[in-house]
Image (cartoon, rainbow, N blue to C red):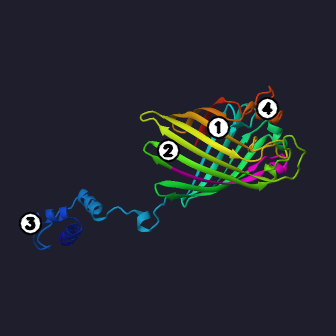
Amino acid sequence: MSIRFASAASAVALIACFATPAFAGETQAAPAGPADETEIAVTEADQAAVALRAIEPIDLATATGQEEEASAITISGSATLTSDYRFRGVSQSDEGMAVQGGFTISHSSGFYVGTWGSNLSGWGTFGGANMELDIYAGYKLPVGEGTLDLGGTWYMYPSGADTTDFAELYAKLSGSVGPIGLTAGVAYAPSQEALGNAFPVGAPANPGDKEDNLYLSGDATYGISGAPITLKAHIGYSDGNPGLGPNGTSVAPTGTYLDWLIGADIVPISGLTLSVAYIDTDITEAEANLIRPNFATLAGDSISDATVVFSVTASF
């Protein structure tokens, strides 16, 4: 019995010698001798130590080649409460409050698709609709130190007349110069009935007329170092039909005009943005009078007057 135990102990010691340098050193320091002449006492602690050092931890994911990869698809979205919904300087909510929201699904390749919506009021009632719903898709790709964004948007007015809906293509090039972020954009809506001059100013109605629309824009942002504040500025140029469309609205109500914005975004906590912006256009009161009452609030004010817009946005 003593010989068998000694042989077993020697075997454990030999395994430890090959498995770990530490144990090999300890074994070599012990007196050596034939197994049948020297008994080595092996405690439970020694056996546990041998097992732990001889068997390294195994990462099953690595061993099977199933390491988790970062998802190629991301989903982002936001919800906004704003004091006025301004589209290219012109109010779409009769200078009243609006609730807006949307989400975007993006792929790591650069492709994305999304939707965005807002409540409406006034401005010819958009063919009876009280909501705008935009569906967009595009592709972003790096260009030098910047990013080129190419895509299209379908502007829909649910429950309204179909002739109010229209499609628009866009391209945006963005980058930075030091701490200043810059974006140049162009949006072009091909000839469509929704953009037509159905009710020309001072001329007979022209139902079914189709026109196109061009919009050029420039944006700049500047983040204040050490503060959660970003200053922003925008200027846009519209060139479209000078009258009213088939449902009393127009993307470019006076034909050609400029709109601009200066403001600031404050991010007090992650995912929450407080915004303020001064918005104005160069549409004169005389030009606005030509397309009243459509181009006015219930109080009779032009919906392109200068205003300050406040909004709060929650994003994810």
Q: In the picture provided, is 24 more to the left or to the right than 182? A: left
Q: Earlier in the sequence, mark 2 or mark 1?
A: 1
- The image shows a total of numbered marks equal to 4
Mark 2 — residue?
Answer: 181
Q: Earlier in the sequence, mark 4 or mark 3?
A: 3
Tell me the element at label 3.
loop
Q: Are marks 4 and 2 in contact (CB under 8 Å)?
A: no
Q: Are marks 1 and 3 in contact (CB under 8 Å)?
A: no
Magenta stretch: residue 157 in it?
A: yes
Q: Earlier in the sequence, mark 1 or mark 4?
A: 1
* Dot 2 amino acid type: Gly
Magenta region: 155-174
Q: Which mark is residue 31?
A: 3
Tell me the element at label 2.
strand
* Dot 1 amino acid type: Thr
Mark 2 neighbour class, 10 Å CA radius: few under 14, some 14 to 19, many 20 or more = some
Q: Find the distance from the CA under tag 4 to the CA under tag 2.
A: 35 Å
Nearer the camera: disc 2 or disc 3 = 2
Is residue 247 placed above or below 91 in the rendered structure?
A: below
x and y percent of residue 78 in the render? 62, 42
Q: Which mark is residue 80?
A: 1
